[in-house]
Every structure is written in C-alpha cells, then in structure tokens.
Amino acid sequence: MTEIQLTNSRTRAKERFEPLDPDRVGLYVCGPTVYDRAHMGNARPVVVFDVLYRLLRHVYGAEHVVYVRNFTDIDDKIIARAEESGRPIGDITSETTQWFLEDMGALGALEPGEMPRATDYVDRMVEMIKALVASGHAYAAEGHVLFAVESDGDYGSLSGRSVDDMIAGARVEVAPYKKNPMDFVLWKPSAADLPGWESPWGRGRPGWHIECSAMSHALLGPSFDIHGGGNDLMFPHHENECAQSRCAHPGSTFARYWLHNEMLQVEGKKMSKSLGNFFTVRDLLDQGIPGEVIRFVFLSTHYRKPMDWTAAKAEAAEATLRGWHRLVGGAEPAGVDQGIVDALADDLNTAGAIARLHAMAREIAGNPQKDCFFEKGVFLASARMMGLMTEEMSGWASAGPDLGGLADRLAALREAAMASKDFSAVDALKAALLDAGVEVRMSKTGVELMPGPGFDAAKVEALG
C-alpha cells in the first residue's frame, strides 16, 4: 500500500499517516459561512483537501473514507446580511449554500460525503457545553457560557502560543464577565428578534468554535484522523476546537493530524476590496475562465506555500490544458501512473504531480509513430485523480480554434512545397501560428500544433 506522508501542523513535522481505522478514514475540513459568494481565498482549501480526499480514496478505497465539511448557517454576518437585505435568514443561507456547491463543483471538487449544517446540530452543541460546565472547563456569566482556557493544560499546543503570551498580545476589549481575557464564548444570548434556541442558560445561540466540535464528534467520533483548513484558522478557531473537544471527551485525541494551507494573493498582493483585486470564484467563471484552469493554477503551488493568482498563470494554464485535452482526445482512462500517486502521497506535492504530467505529455507527443493509446489512457487517469480533465470539465477545451484543421493545412502546404521547392506559404503560416502563441512541431510523420505560453485564440481564429 502507498505510504502517505503529511506535514502535521501540531508537531511541525512531516509524519507517516496511519489512520485509526483503515476501514473508516476520517477527514474534517472547516467549511464556509454562507452569507455571500465564495472568494478565491475560500476556494483554495476546498481544492487542496479535495486532492487529499481523492488520494485517500485511491489508497484506502472510496467506501472507506468519510469526508465531512460543514456549513456555518448561523452567524453575525448572516444576521447582518438579513437585516441589510430584508430577506429571511433561511432564504439567504439556502441560496448561498447552493452557490458554494455550484462554484466549487465548477472547480472539479467532489462533494464530501457529509455536509452538516450548524443549525441542525444545536442540541448536540448544548449537550457538549453542559458537559464542559459540569466538569469545570466552562462557566456561565450574564447569559453567556465561556470556556475557561486555564482549565486546559494543553491550550496553545496547536498554535504554539502560551496563554501568557496571548494575554500580553491581546488588543481587544475584554468583556467584564470573563474570568480570563482569553476565555472564549460557547453560548451567547439572543434578543427576541434574533435567531435563538432554548438552553439551560436562557435563549441564545452557539459561539462559532463549538459548532465544528459538535459536528465532528457526531459524524467522526471523539478521535479521528485529519482536520484541515486555512492557516488563518489555526488560531483561535482550531486551537479552541482542540481545547473544548479534549475537555468534553477526556481521553480523546480529537484530530490526530492537522493540515493547514497557506493564503492566496492576487498579482503579488493580498486580496483586498480596497486594492481592487478581490475576486469571487463566480467573478472569474463569468469572465470566461474555465474552472479547470482555476484548479490547475491552484495545484501548481504546494499547499503550504503562499499562492499567487496572476493572469499570466491563468493564460499559461489554459494553453497547457487545451494541449493536453487535444493530445489524449478519444482515449479512455487506464490506470493511474504511480509517479503521480507518489508525488501526491509526499505531503500533497501537487506541483510535483503536475511536473510529472508535463513529462508524460512530452513523451506521448514525442512518439507520434508509437501506439500510445495505453499511455494516453494512463495520462488521462492520472490527470483525473487530480481532478483535472474529467468528463464534467472537458467541454470548454474542445471549443475554440481548430488547431487540428490548421495542422492539416500546414501539412498540405508543406507537401506542396516539397514538390515546388517554394516554402514561402509554409513559412508564412508557421510565423502566424507562432505569433498567435502556438507551438509548431513538424516531423517526417506529420505536423502537430499545441497551444503555448501567450496563446491567443482570437489570432488563431483569424487564420481559419
């Protein structure tokens, strides 16, 4: 069996992945707060952990992997959006949940087997909070219930921070009912005109952190294998999840492996509305950038490195993918290349896996006389393991300029030139193709055209 190595954020080291139960591998990833469209930064962890999900399914079998990604459908941002728009909260969360699923599906992300909504698990959150209060790890104050961080001797172990350092660095106003400035909210009161549930502490709603602890416990148990998310969630969200879950279920490990992806930039700068470089996934899709291209750009950078989205990368990715689709057109998937599996098993080295696909494509293209149909099938299966070149995502690549027709024309011109010794027409078409960003490969066996860097579909169309 393939050995998977993952960098565990808790230990700051790459470790061999050994599931608690190979017949039920558990993966939990923090999902979106559904009040608006998902932006590009939201999409990166979805793609990263989709690759991990695909790898785990490949190694352990699809039926043996339980992937949970939640929806936070009650939150102050959602309430604010409802007040601004005058729309019911349920309408907003239903709509934006569907938007999220559609946009992530356009990026080739498989839907997790479990997608719990926070509002369906409030009773379980209340039960967990009651257990924390009873064991002295939480306390009620002025309608709130707060977790007492000093009651957990391991608090700060995930993020590597000490409680004293956190208090010293805090720049937030401390509520008077807190015993310790770092204590965090498990339950808070709700006014009559706001969403709320009955509880032993009065009508209210859960704090953010308790949601994931309750949902992961319900669907994966007190101890499970992998917890993932963006590194902006490591503190305080994941740190607080760890603390309350360990204390609510003594003897449990909660998540054994923690994976965090780095953040996303746009053209070398932090994505920000004030800088005018803030994009939702839907913005890019509506601009005509295929979801497969977006996914390819994401996978070209290792998940633990900052990813820079640029127009140039998108153009290069589109050219590469068009070439790959044409290269293996008509082939059927036929077994995943072990080199691809090994790259992904090495801490999700997606950049290395893409480099392997490039090498495979060059080998196939460089052997036109060889019967490469099997090799093409291996290439296709390998790309699909990474969520690329799937049937659902391939339609866009067949549209656009007919490079095959142009290749035939160039081949005919060359044949005529061989007889007339006048290669001017061949040189003219070849120069025009190169100017349009098309790679021209001419050999004794034929002519092959491939989109290259700077591929300009409009210029190619004009040659038709």
Image (spheres, helix red, strand yellow):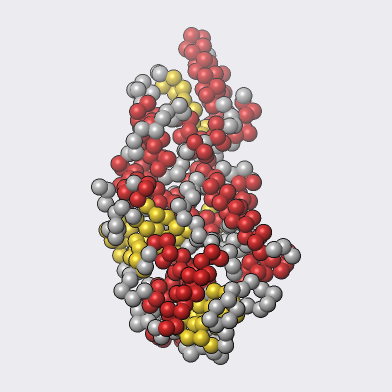
Q: Residue at x 63, y 51 (%)?
A: 283
Q: How many marks?
A: 0
Does 187 appear above or below 52? below
Please indicate, yes or no, whether residue 334 appears anywhere in the rendered image: yes
Residue 278 drawn at (x, y percent): 61, 59
On screen, residue 419 versus residue 276, left or right, reads: left
Does 293 appear above or below 39? above
Q: Quadrant of residue 231?
A: bottom left
Q: Please, which residue is most extreme toward the right here?
A: 86
Residue 117 drawn at (x, y percent): 53, 61
Q: Nearer the viewer, residue 4 or 23?
A: 23
Does 169 appear above or below 89? below
On screen, residue 232 versus residue 160, left or right, reads: right
Does 318 appear above or below 444? below
Q: Please, which residue is most extreme toward the left here?
A: 1
Q: Residue at x 48, y 30 (%)?
A: 326
Residue 241 drawn at (x, y percent): 43, 72
Q: Nearer the viewer, residue 154 or 234?
A: 154
Q: Residue at x 42, y 61 (%)?
A: 219
Residue 75 drawn at (x, y percent): 59, 69
Q: Residue at x 38, y 64 (%)?
A: 221
Q: Quadrant of residue 396?
A: top right
Please indicate, yes or no, whether residue 361 appears anywhere in the rendered image: no
Q: Quadrant of the C terminus?
A: top right
Q: Nearer the viewer, residue 450 or 225?
A: 225
